[in-house]
Image: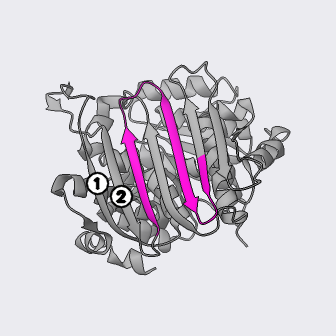
Amino acid sequence: MVKRFYEETSADRGARVAEQLGYQEREKMHNLLIIGSGLIGREHIRVASLLGAGRIHGIYDTNQQSMDLAEAELLKYSDERVVRYTSLHSACTDQAIDVILICTPNYTHHQILSEAIKSGKPIFVEKPMATSLTDGAEILRLSDNYSTFIQVGMQYRYKAQYVDAFHEVKSLNSLGRVKTISMSEYRPPFLDKVEQWNKFNEYSGGTFVEKCCHYFDLINLMAEARPRDVFASGGRAVNFLDFEYKGRKSDIDDHGFVIINYCNGIRANFTLNMFANEFYEELVVTGEKGRLVASEKASANKDKQTKASIMVEVDDHQHYEGSEIGYPESIEKSGHHGATFFEHEALMGQLQQEEVDAASPRQGLLAMLVASAAQRSIIENSVISIAEHAKQNGIEGILRQ
């Protein structure tokens, strides 16, 4: 039986792993291939090294500087020589590799996965798994017929505040039946990436797909129902209004509001603002018995400690006035406030053929479906039927699964 990601609280997770870092015997470690050695690729190097269940056997990137930075990152944790592959084919077909991690720019995911899947090896692909619903549907089809697994990088579900929020709502039933869900993110603008790919809808999939698929994944999981329709309002207000790269002007949105209605009657909303000074996330779930607020405040200044908390406004609840939560500092600082570490733990569990609750291509595509419907709603200024939107993109079958 699959153990859901929220059955264990963040405190239990932290206590369990605190004394187990680097726990695997070297001969039992899995060999990892990192394809794409930019910021997120190097984050995966850090968390894999910290967890200790896998070693970075090789890296591949078309950008030599990115590979140099990745190798330098790895040298902080290991003196083993890493293989630098000269082609995608040679990297994927190396018999020494146990699992392939695709950490390249969004628009390359589908193409690279289509090559990697020929290897027959387990695959991890970063979010969003594609930039179009058509490509996402093809990845789902490939996954359904694959001899092993494909895991999608929806690591936010492992953040301490969301683990505890889901534990309260799903495991403990603290709120009774859920009625409304609200999420928000306030943060600074997109960071610089190689060739500035994240400043253009064509390459990123659009802001709601690129940045917000994490949140739509969480909202879908909390609602536990098929989304019925979406209405959104958003646009470009502050960021990159005059930004150009190689003569091309940026076209990504920097703020928006999304309303989602689910078929079980739950109503949800999401707020995004990408021109704030600091990072702030919040999940508010309200049920028959009361309200839950899970939040995280982080800083662009990496020396400042991230603060996560949970408040459960239900009579006599231990967190009624709010409680600070979090992971051990070493895990917290390894990347995405500890979430990527536990995402890797799930990946290693799948490699060991354990029943693991990790993000699947179907869940990744459902999050993309809501995100792309929101982007379409902004353009058309209309309510978007999820069934009609799925049919228009040739993926109506996903809603019947």
Query: Which of the 4 image quarters holds residue 174?
Result: bottom right
**341 or 82: which is nearer to us?**
341
From the image, give the main secondary structure of the stretch colored magenta. strand
Q: Residues within 10 Å of mark 2 (few under 14, many from 20)?
A: some
The amino acid marked with disc number 2 is: Ile
Mark identifier at residue 259: 2
272 drawn magenta? yes
Q: Residue furthest left?
A: 247
Q: Residue furthest bottom?
A: 400
User: Where residue 81 sits: x, y (%)?
Assistant: 64, 30
Q: Earlier in the sequence, mark 1 or mark 2?
A: 1
Point 61% across, 36% down: residue: 337
The part of the chain drawn in magenta is 266-293
Q: Is residue 156 left or right of residue 194?
A: right
- Residue 77 appearing in the image: yes
Q: Residues within 10 Å of mark 1 (few under 14, many from 20)?
A: many
Point 69% across, 41% down: residue: 322
382 drawn magenta? no
Point 36% across, 34% down: residue: 274
Do tag 1 and tag 2 residues touch (Cβ < 8 Å)?
Answer: yes
Q: Is residue 119 above or below residue 280?
A: below
Q: Is residue 46 above or below residue 224?
A: above
The amino acid marked with disc number 1 is: Ala
Point 79% across, 38% down: residue: 21
Residue, disc 1: 232
